Image (cartoon, coloured by chain):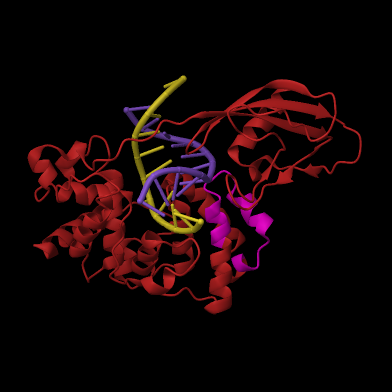
Chain colours: A red, B purple, C yellow
DNA sequence: CAAACGTGGAC
DNA sequence: TGTCCAAGTTT
């Protein structure tokens, strides 16, 4: 019985909903309180491929700095990118700002409330559109994120590997989504995946869906969902140059496209198998060590060079460590420790 | 559609 | 130390 599934899950959620700063819990929701769609959209973009723990402080910072979508739309690009620094996947920040400007300019500063309209916004894909529609507007949209893929693959014993299984999982997930309390339901199934139906060692003993779970019945829950094997990451190398003049450093804004796009960084060589040194100007550079960092699809080893008080002709700027992507923070820390 | 795109925590 | 993973989207 489909209704029984959603009822059991919502009953569990009423007792076990996780607390998050952007969330209106089931009790408050029952009184008619609704979350701010802007805050929900903000949280959902930040949560893409990112943990709740990592997002919390960034969400608070953004909401304090830009309390409405119109405030964000009016922000400087550089301020938004700097505030996002450290959170990763920087295309999300560029799209966040684009989206805010579209909502401000084309929607009168009011978020659209349908999946169809939300899908047209920059940085809003099928998951985020369904999440905002359901959580912010209580529309009966079905969210399918990594949690839902795992929960549904186990519940319905779907053994096709991801991502091929996505359509099958989506269909099964849609069939369970209730018309009543769809916003709570969306958050409930994701909470279930995050806290009970976890990738390793799922806590089936306390799961509200333990009885109907087909994978559990066969004891194969930990094997699902199946995934295609991943490629091994290559290691790339590079040279990076930190030129200091007092508390000013030589930095550059990276192009919008590509890795760390739109972010501030230190100059250097390309990152490849066998890069050539590429100092930004001639000087008595000192190599102070190397920095290792792993991105989504490769490992990086950077040979860090530094020089102080170089001669004129080059633009230096004050640099705030927190405004830099992590790999550049590491390089800055290495140079700072060397002094 | 496969690949690009970050980071920090868990094991 | 290394691998896997987390509330995906874009090209």
Q: Is residue A93 left or right of residue A206?
A: right
At 28% from the left and 70% from the top, the residue drawn is A140
The outermost residue toward the right is A312
Tell me residue A261's x, y (percent).
61, 49
Tell me residue A180's x, y (percent).
22, 71
Q: Is residue A205 left or right of residue A298?
A: left
Q: Which residues are magenta?
A: A72-96
The quarter of the image holding the N terminus of chain A is bottom left
- Above or below — where is A302 with respect to A218? above
* Whether residue A159 can be seen here: yes
Q: Is residue A186 left or right of residue A97?
A: left
At 50% from the left and 76% from the top, the residue drawn is A110
Tell me residue A226's x, y (percent).
24, 41
Q: Quarter-wise, where is residue A198 in the image?
A: top left
Tell me residue A52's x, y (percent).
42, 48
At 45% from the left and 31% from the top, the residue drawn is A233
The quarter of the image holding the C terminus of chain A is top right
Provide the major secondary structure of the magenta segment. Answer: helix
Q: Is residue A81 left or right of residue A277?
A: left
Q: Quarter-wise, where is residue A331 in the image?
A: top right
At 39% from the left and 68% from the top, the residue drawn is A136
* Whether residue A192 can be seen here: no
Q: Is residue A82 magenta?
A: yes
Q: How many marks?
A: 0
């Amino acid at each position: 019985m489909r209704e029984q599934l959603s009822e059991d899950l919502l009953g569990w959620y009423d007792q076990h909903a996780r607390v998050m700063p952007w969330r209106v819990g089931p009790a408050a929701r029952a009184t008619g309180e609704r979350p701010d769609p802007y805050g929900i959209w903000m949280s959902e973009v930040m949560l893409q491929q990112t943990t709740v723990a990592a997002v919390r402080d960034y969400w608070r910072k953004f909401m304090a700095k830009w309390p409405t979508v119109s405030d964000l739309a009016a922000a400087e690009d550089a301020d938004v990118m700097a505030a996002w620094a450290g959170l990763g996947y920087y295309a999300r920040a560029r799209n966040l700002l684009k989206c805010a400007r579209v909502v401000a300019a084309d929607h009168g500063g009011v978020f659209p409330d349908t999946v169809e309209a939300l899908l047209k916004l920059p940085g809003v894909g099928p998951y985020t559109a369904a999440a905002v529609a359901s959580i912010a507007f209580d529309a009966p949209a079905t969210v399918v994120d990594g949690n839902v893929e795992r929960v549904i693959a186990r519940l319905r014993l779907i053994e096709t590997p991801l991502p091929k299984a996505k359509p099958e999982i989506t269909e099964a997930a849609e069939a369970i989504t209730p018309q009543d309390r769809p916003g709570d339901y969306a958050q409930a199934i994701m909470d279930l995946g995050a806290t009970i139906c976890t990738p390793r060692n799922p806590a089936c003993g306390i799961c509200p869906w333990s009885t109907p779970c087909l994978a559990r019945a066969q004891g194969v829950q930990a094997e699902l969902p199946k995934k295609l094997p991943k490629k091994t990451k290559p290691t790339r190398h590079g040279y990076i140059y930190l030129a200091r003049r007092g508390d000013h450093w030589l930095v550059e804004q990276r192009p919008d496209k590509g890795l760390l796009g739109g972010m501030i960084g230190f100059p250097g060589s390309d990152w490849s198998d066998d890069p050539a040194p590429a100092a930004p100007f001639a000087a008595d550079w000192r190599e102070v060590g190397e920095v290792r960092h792993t991105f989504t699809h490769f490992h990086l080893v950077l040979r860090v060079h530094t020089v102080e008080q170089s001669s004129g002709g080059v633009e230096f700027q004050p640099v705030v460590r927190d405004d830099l992507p992590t790999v550049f923070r590491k390089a800055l820390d290495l140079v700072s420790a060397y002094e």
